[in-house]
Image (cartoon, rainbow, N blue to C red):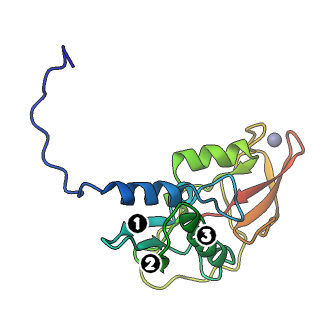
Amino acid sequence: MAGVTAQSAPSAPSAPTAPSAERTAWQVAAGVVDPELPMLTLRDLGVLREVQVSDDGAVVASITPTYSGCPAMATMRDDLVRTLRAAGFADVSVRVVLEPPWTTDQITAEGRAALADAGISAPGTAPRHEGPVALNLGPIRRAVRCPRCGSGDVRLVSEFGSTACKAQYSCRACWEPFDHVKEI
Ligand SMILES: [Zn+2]
């Protein structure tokens, strides 16, 4: 450590020092992948909120739903329980947290890069809602770029792609079809 000079003392972090079991459980849970977007871990997706391990070894993993009716939630829950049990945590439960709500803005930079690598267009900035949400039945305009060639000359084919959370586009420059994760 020679040569390292202390800067002004940082303020004490408020986060508690996680016991090693909690850290291990977090790392195991964070590595579980989304069943519909398997290039994303639950951490990349931003749905894994917290993993707590009590003194008796019981694990509670908190996840937040992506959108109402997402069929992947039950699978995520089962995968979390199975993976944590396989890692040696016998007593595992999953808690669903609704507040604060998940938005696609919580997909991490690593997650966005993984989507692009898989030929999937990452979501743009999610819309902000205050109070009642108006139901828009008109076409939704998005500034989407082709994940393969980068062209912005793209055409919406369908609001629903390979899963309900993605829209399908085609690129007029390279003619490849691609999915776009919709902003919510
Ligand atoms: Zn293209």
For this view, does 151 lie left or right of residue 16?
Answer: right
Mark 1 lies on residue? 50
Give the left or right position of residue 157, taking residue 115 as reference.
right
Residue on which disc 2 sits:
97
Is residue 115 rendered to the left or right of residue 107? Answer: right
Q: Position of residue 136 (x, y in %)?
A: 64, 79
Sequence-first tag of 1 and 2: 1
On the rendered image, what quadrant is the N terminus found in?
Answer: top left
Q: Which residue is mark 3?
A: 82
Q: Nearer the viewer, mark 1 or mark 2?
A: 1
Looking at the image, residue 36 lies above or below residue 116: below
Does label 2 point to a residue whose CB lies under 8 Å from ligand 1? no
What residue is shown at x 78% (from left), y 69% (from top)? 160
Within 10 Å of disc 3 (Cα), the crowding (few <14, some 14-19, many 20+) is some
> Residue 161 at what x, y percent from top left?
80, 65
First-in-chain label (2 vs 3): 3
Q: Residue furthest left?
A: 8
What amino acid is labelled 1 in the image?
A: Glu
Please determine whether, in this image, residue 134 is positioned above or below residue 79. below
Eye-nearest disc, 2 or 3: 3
Q: Residue at x 70, y 65 (%)?
A: 35
